[in-house]
Image (tube, rainbow, N blue to C red):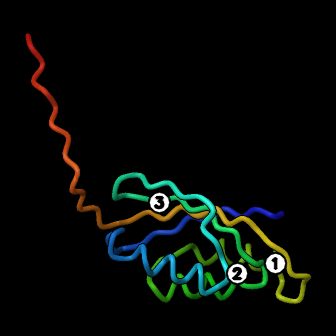
Amino acid sequence: MDRIFVEAYCSHLRNEIIHKIQKVISENGGWIVDHQMFSDKSITLLIETDNLKLEKMFHDFQMIEVNMNSNRLNTILLGFPQDQNPGKINLYMVINFMENHSSRQIKVPAVPG
């Protein structure tokens, strides 16, 4: 199974956009196999999807303002032409959220001395 790494950024809050991200993935036949959330700043997704649906999935991500480097996307899509045999791929996706309004606060105790 082929693997692809993609880094994306989004100007929305994580809590506002996460359901739209899930919808794009499921509408394009993908499954979130694993995920890691790092506070409100980023999320890492492992997505299993069909290689023939990559182009539409990337386009749908851009429609909800989850943006990726266009040169990197073109390179990826050239490696998976639409006329090739269908198969599954693992898409490792890191999404960084530019608007960080963290609700988590850690109080640092006073240091004696």
Residue at the image point whose x is 34% and y is 58% from the top? 40
Find residue 57 and report its image quarter.
bottom right
Q: Is residue 40 left or right of residue 112?
A: right
Asked if marks 3 and 1 touch (Cβ < 8 Å), the reply is: no
The label nearer to you, 2 versus 1, is 2
Residue at the image point whose x is 21% and y is 56% from the top? 103
- Residue 102 is situated, as x and y percent measured from the top left of the image, at 24, 57
Q: Is residue 49 left or right of residue 100?
A: right
The residue indicated by pointer 1 is: 80
* Amino acid type at image mark 2: Leu
The residue indicated by pointer 2 is: 54
The residue indicated by pointer 3 is: 43
Find residue 100 and report its image quarter.
bottom left
Q: Residues within 10 Å of mark 2 (few under 14, many from 20)?
A: many
Q: Residues within 10 Å of mark 3 (few under 14, many from 20)?
A: some
Question: Helix or strand or loop: what does disc 2 sit on?
Answer: helix
Residue at the image point whose x is 54% and y is 58% from the top? 35
**Quadrant in the picture for the C terminus:** top left
Q: Nearer the viewer, residue 83 or 106?
A: 106
* Amino acid type at image mark 3: Ile
Q: Is residue 57 above or below residue 69?
A: below
Q: Nearer the viewer, residue 86 or 59?
A: 86
Which residue is situated farthest in the right direction here? 85
Q: Is residue 86 left or right of residue 59?
A: right
Q: CA distance from mark 3 to mark 1?
A: 25 Å
